[in-house]
Image (spheres, rainbow, N blue to C red):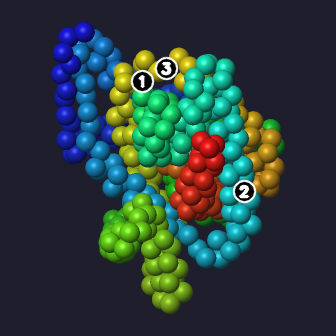
Amino acid sequence: MADVETLHVDDFVALTVGIIVYFVGVLLTRRIAFLRNFNIPEPVTGGLIAASTTYAMFVVFDLSIEFSLSNRDELLVYFFTAIGLNARFSDLLRGGRALAILLVLTIAYIVLQNLVGLAGVTIFGLPEPVAVLTGSASLIGGHGTAIAWAPDIAERYGIGNAMEIGIACATFGLILASLIGGPIAKILIDRNNLKADPNAADIVGIAYDTDGGRTVNHISIMAALLALNVAIIIGYAINAELESHGFKLPLFVTCLLVAILMSNAVTYLLPRVPWPARTRALALISDYALNIFLAMSLMSMQLWTLAGLAGPLLGILVLQTVAVTLFVLFLLFRCMGSNYEAAVLGAGFGGFALGATPTAVANMTAVTKEHGPAPNAFIILPLVAAFFVDLANAIIIRTFLS
C-alpha cells in the first residue's frame, strides 16, 4: 500500500459534517420503515454510513480522515446538563427503589459480561487476561476504561496488542449498542402491549408527529440556553476545584449534579420564576446535543484500524450481544416492573452494556419519540452509569485479573 495521506478536519467543519451526517440519518429513517419500526437512532444510521465512506476512501485513495472532536465533547456536557435541569428530587425519591434495583442488576451484569468474555477467549484461543478487554473493561467501561486498563494488562501478562484489542472491542461494541436497543424495546412493547403514561412529561426527544400545542419560540430557546450555560459555568468551576485537590470526575458528571441542585433550588425558592425544566425548548436543545454528539462519534471511527482484529473479536461480541439481549428480555425487564418505562430502560441498558451512556440515551430517545415519554428512565440510567459503575467495574476487573 502507498503512503497514507492524512486529512485533518478542524472543529467547525467537523461539527458541520456531523449535522449533515445526522440529516442523512433523518432522511433514511423517514424513507425506510425498518429503521423507524426498530427505533434505530438517526445519528447511528448516518454515522455508520459516514464511517463506511471514510473507510472506502482509505482503501481506494489511501486517505485517512481525522476529525477534531472538541466540539463533540462540549455537546456531551450540554446534554447531561439538560438531563440535570429536568431532574426533580421528588422523582429521584420516588425512583429510589428502581435506581437501587438497576444498580444491583448492572453490577451482576458486569460479572456476567466478563464470564462471557472468558468463554469467548477460550473458544477462540486467545489469552485468558484478554477476557476483561472483551468484557466489561471495553464494553460497559467504554474507550476510556479500555485505554486505562490496557497498559497494565500488556505489562503484567505480556499481551503486546492489549491496547488495540481494547479499542477495537469498545468501537465494535459502540456500533452494536447503537443497533440493538431499539429492537429490544420493540419486542418488549409489542409482546406486552405497553403504552406510555399520557401524563408523563418530555425530558428529551421531540415526538415525530406534532408538538402537542406546546410552542417553541426564541424566548424559550434563549431561556433554556441561559440556564444551561449558568449550570455549566458553575460545573466547570467546581470540577477544577475538585481536580486541584486530587479528586477527578468527568466534567459532565459535575455539570449534571450542579444542574440538579440548581433546578430544584430555583423551582422551590422562586416558584413564580419561569424555568425551562421539562419544556419543549430544553428537549429540543438536548436532542440537538445528543444527536450531533453521536453522529460525530460514529462518523469519526477509523474502521481500517480494526480490520486485523475483526474475526475473533466479532465472534466474542456476538456472544456478548446475545447475552445482553437475553438478560434484558428475561431478567431486567421483569425486575424493573414489566411496564413501558422498563422497556425503555431495556433499550438504554442494551446501549449502555455494549457502548456508552450517550448511546444508551440515544436508544431510549429513539423509542420515546415513537411511543411516548419515559422521564424516570432518563434520570435513573445516567445516575447509575455516572456514579456507581466505574468503581464497581474497577473492582470486578481487578478480581478477574487476579
The one of 137 and 37 positioned closer to us in this rendering: 137
Find the distance from the CA under tag 1 to the CA under tag 3: 6 Å
Residue 191 seen in the figure:
yes
Question: What kind of residue is marked 2?
Answer: Val
Quadrant that contains the N terminus: top left
The disc placed on residue 239 is: none
Please tell me which of labels 1 and 2 falls first in the chain: 2
Say whether residue 252 is left or right of residue 128. Answer: left
Q: Which residue is mark 3?
A: 310
Which residue appears farthest toward the bottom when viewing the image?
269
Q: Residue 12's spot in the image, x, y percent? A: 21, 45
Dot 1: element: helix
**Residues at badges 1 and 3 in contact (C-beta under 8 Å)?**
yes
Give the Cα separation between the discs numbered 1 and 2: 33 Å
In the orientation shown, which residue stands out farthest toward the top? 1
Is residue 207 in view? no
Which label is found at residue 104? Answer: 2
Name the residue at 74% across, 40% down. 327
Q: Which residue is mark 1?
A: 306
Residue 36 locus on image (x, y percent) = 58, 34
Residue 151 image position (x, y, % from top left): 42, 40
Q: Name the quadrant containing residue 140.
A: top right
Lateral position of residue 267 relative to residue 319, left or right: left
- How crowded is the residue under tag 2: few (<14 C-alpha within 10 Å), some, or many (20+)? few
Amino acid type shown at disc 1: Leu
Whether 338 is drawn above or below 127: the answer is below
Q: Amino acid at mark 3?
A: Ala
- Secondary structure at badge 3 equals helix
